[in-house]
Amino acid sequence: YRGGGSIPLETLTEESQSRHVLPASFEAKSLQKSNWGFFLTGLVGGTLVAVYAVATPFITPALRKVCLPFVPATTKQIENVVKMLQCRRGSLVDIGSGDGRIVIAAAKEGFTAVGYELNPWLVWYSRYRAWREGVHGSAKFYISDLWKVTFSQYSNVVIFGVPQMMLQLEKKLELELADDARVIACRFPFPHWTPDHVTGEGIDTHTLGDSDNES
């Protein structure tokens, strides 16, 4: 006993210790919250990695000096291109082929068609579409920067460009294409070539000319 009190010393000691002992249920809840915290952190981190992996190929081209953005060709634009290819033969290339619509349409018309596209996700999707449409044997798609490709082997060229790139591309095609090559520029014309034919208006404007045709 302590002093003149009536509570045994052992009882006081047990009560003091009991104040510092956490219930088992409280410890379990704390552990469960900790596990959920790790799970949510991993989930958020994994999601960010996945988004980065998917979005990077789309964003990276926009960071280049000359940007060729992905804008799907409309049905009217595809019809105009096919119309301008009438009576033509040989190989065809779509520079910046996007989701492969032009290449697939050309393959259905009997062309050996190739698309070059910097975005790997669009290339894989184009290959799937070509397989689904039954033209994967004559429609090929490659992941490549258009400035690193030589187009001398193609008789027909299709380009959905932007104004900032047309002059540089014009010079490149002049050096590489044969004199009888057919070039179809969609939306924006080449600055120095006089077109042989113009179809459509606005975003559906298509100009057609030979690679050696200059103003």
Image (cartoon, helix red, strand yellow):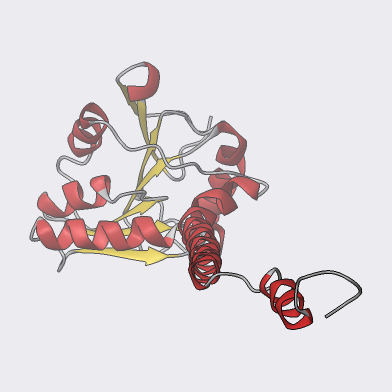
Which part of the image, by quadrant, shows the N terminus?
bottom right
Q: Quadrant of residue 139?
A: bottom left
Residue positioned most to the top? 201
Left or right of 7: which side holds 200? left
Left or right of 1: which side holds 118? left
Q: Is residue 129 above or below residue 168?
A: below
Q: Position of residue 199 (x, y in %)?
A: 29, 22
The residue nearer to you, when weighing 195 against 179, is 195
Q: Is residue 149 above or below residue 16?
A: above
Q: How many labels were placed on the picture?
A: 0
Residue positioned most to the left? 134
Q: Is residue 211 visible?
A: yes
The residue nearer to you, when weighing 83 against 139, is 139
Q: Is residue 135 visible?
A: no
Q: Residue at x 27, y 57 (%)?
A: 126
Q: Quadrant of residue 90?
A: bottom left
Q: Is residue 213 above or below residue 172?
A: above
Q: Position of residue 187 (x, y in %)?
A: 42, 28
Q: Residue at x 50, y 65 (%)?
A: 29
Left or right of 57: which side holds 123? left
The residue nearer to you, when weighing 139 against 174, is 139
Q: Is residue 25 above or below residue 9?
A: above
Q: Residue at x 11, y 51 (%)?
A: 108
Q: Position of residue 9 (x, y in %)?
A: 79, 80
Left or right of 56: which side holds 11? right
